[in-house]
Amino acid sequence: MDIISELPDDVLRKILYFLSQEEAARTSVLSKPWRYIWCTRPNLDFSYTPPTMGVDYNRFRAENKIKKQEFISAVDATLRRYRDNQSACAEEFRLSMSLDNSNYDPDRVSVSFLEKWVPSLVNMVTKEFHLSIVSERYPGRVELPPVVWGCEPLRYLYLEKFLLDQKAIERIVPLKNLKSLGLQEILIEDDTIFGKIISNCPSIENLDVHGFLSLKTIKVSDDDLHNLKNVNFSFDTVLRDVLRELRIIEIHHSSLETINIGNANICFGEGAGFLNLKYLNLGGVKSPLGHLSSYKFPSLENLEFHDCDGLKGSEVLFIDAPNIVYFEFSGEFIPSISIATTSEEWESCIDIPYVPGNNNDDPLSFFIKLKQLLESLSDSEIYLTGNHSMHFNDYVIPENIRNGCDGGNKYVVVENLILNFHLSSVIPSLLNRFLSICRPRNVVNCNLDQLENNNESWWFRDLEEAKLEAYDISQGKWHATTLSELPNYDDSEYYDTRIALKWRES
C-alpha cells in the first residue's frame, strides 16, 4: 500500500476536496482505503444539463426524462448516505441544473426535488450552499419552491426565468451567509417582493440582475445591503422597446467598487460618495448624466460610456478621477467630456461613427467636435476607430481646421487609428479626413498602396516614414515586414497587420 493511502480518512477527504465530483469518484479504484472515501468528502458538486434537442422531439423528451431521473436519484442517494454516516459532513454543496427546455406545457411546474434536498442540507449543518437553477421555459412558467428562501446556509444563488410571487418568499428568513445573488429574466409579481428579498440578504457583496420582466424601479442602498461591492443591472433592448420605457436604478450606496448598468436609467442619491468605486460602465442610459460632474471618484480606474443619450447636448461633463487607467466611449454622437487626472499613463478608446441623419452634424461640425474631444483626452494614449457607417464622399476639411487656426491644437497624437470599412475604395478618402485633425502613430485596416496613391498630398509633407508591420503572437510584439512576405506567414502565428507612421516634428 502506498504512503498516501495510509493517511487518516479526514486527510484523504481533504485531498478529495480539491477534485471535481467525477474526479473524486474515479479515486475509488486506486485501492481499498479509497473505495468509499469519495462518498463522504466535505464538498459535493452536482451539475445537470439536458441533452441537446435533435429533430426527433419525442426521443429527446424520453432521453431527458431518463437522464434527469438518474441525476435526481444520484443526488438523493448521496444525501441519504451523508445523513446515515455520522462522521460525514457536507460543508459545501453546489447544485447546478438546467430544466427541460420544452415550452409546450402551459402549466406552471414546481422543481419539487428542492423540497427534499434543502431541508437535508440544513439538518446536516451545511456551511456553504451554492444553487444555480436555470429554467429553459418561458419566463415565469416555473415556480420557485419557498424552501429555497428559507435555507440559511445559502451562500450563492443564481436563478433564471422563474416566477417569484408571495408564495415563493413566504418562508424567507434572514440569509446572513448569502454573498452573491443573480437573477435573470425573473418574473416578479410586485415591487414589494424584491424589496423583501433584499432586506433579508444583508451580507450580499455581488448583485447581478439581467432582464427583469417587471419592476419599474430598483433601489440599492446601504441601509439594507451593508457589504455590497458590485452591482450589475442589464436589461434587453427588445424588452425596452416593447415597454417604451427604461427601468430606473436608484443607487444610494457609498461602498460600491463596481457599477455596471445596461439599458436603464440611473439616479444617484444626494450626497452619494464613491470613494471605493473602481469600475463604472454605463450603456444605453437615456437619463441626463451631467450630475456626475458633482462627484469625486478618487479610486476610479475604468470608465465606460456606450450609447448613452444622457450625454447628448449637455455642458462639458467633468470627471474628477485622479487614478483613471482606462476610458472608453462609443456612440453615434460626440460628447463633451473632460477628465481631471494625475495618472501618467492611461488609455482612451473612442468609437464614433458618422451616420448622416443620426448625428445631426455636417462633416465639418463632426470633425471639429471630434478634434475637441481628442484634445481633451490628449494626455492619454488614444485609440480611435472610424466606423463603417461613415461616408464623406469627397468632402475636404478646411485648411484652418487642419492648421489649428480654429483655436485648437494643430494635430492631436493618436496611438492607433482603426478604419472599419468593408469597401477599400472609401479608405483613402476617410484617412484624409482623420489626418486633418490627428497624427496617428499606427493605422490599422489600411495598406501602403492606399497610403502612397492618395490624391491629397497636403499631409504627406509631414510624413517622414511609413512601414508595414505584422504582429507576432509567440513573441507578443510587432515587427517590420513587406507585402511580398505576408503570404508566407502562418495565420496561427500572425493575426494582424498595421502601418506604422513616423511624423516630422512640427
Image: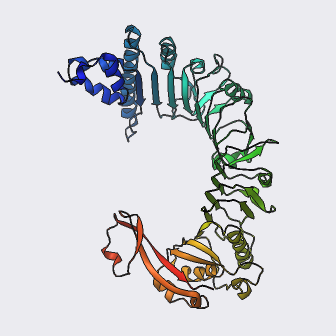
In depth, the one of 316 and 387 nearer the eye is 316
| Residue 12 position (above or below residue 51) | above
Q: Nearer the viewer, residue 16 or 147?
A: 16
For the point 67% across and 30% down, the residue is 188
Residue 143 spot, x, y in % from top left? 58, 25
Residue 305 placement (x, y as % from top left)? 67, 56
Q: Position of residue 393 (x, y in %)?
A: 63, 82
Can residue 386 be seen here?
no
Q: For residue 26, what is the image quadrant? A: top left
Query: Quadrant of the rendered structure where residue 409 is?
Result: bottom right
Q: Residue 114 at x, y = what percent?
A: 50, 19
* Quarter of the N terminus within the rendering: top left
Q: Could one spot residue 446 in this view of the protein?
A: yes
Q: Is residue 326 left or right of residue 24?
A: right
Say if 331 sits above or below 252 in the image: below
**Residue reaching furthest left?**
1
Rendered-image quadrant of the C terminus: bottom right
User: Residue at the location (58% across, 26% down)?
Assistant: 178
- Picture layout, residue 473 above or below residue 392: above
In the displayed structure image, the side of residue 486 where residue 296 appears, left or right: right
Report the front residue among 200 and 86.
86
Q: How many marks?
A: 0
By what rule are the colours in the image chosen? rainbow
In the displayed structure image, the side of residue 29 where residue 292 appears, left or right: right
Residue visible at 36% across and 20% down?
41
The residue lying toward the viewer, choosing from 61 and 134, is 134
User: Residue 386 sits in which quadrant?
Assistant: bottom right
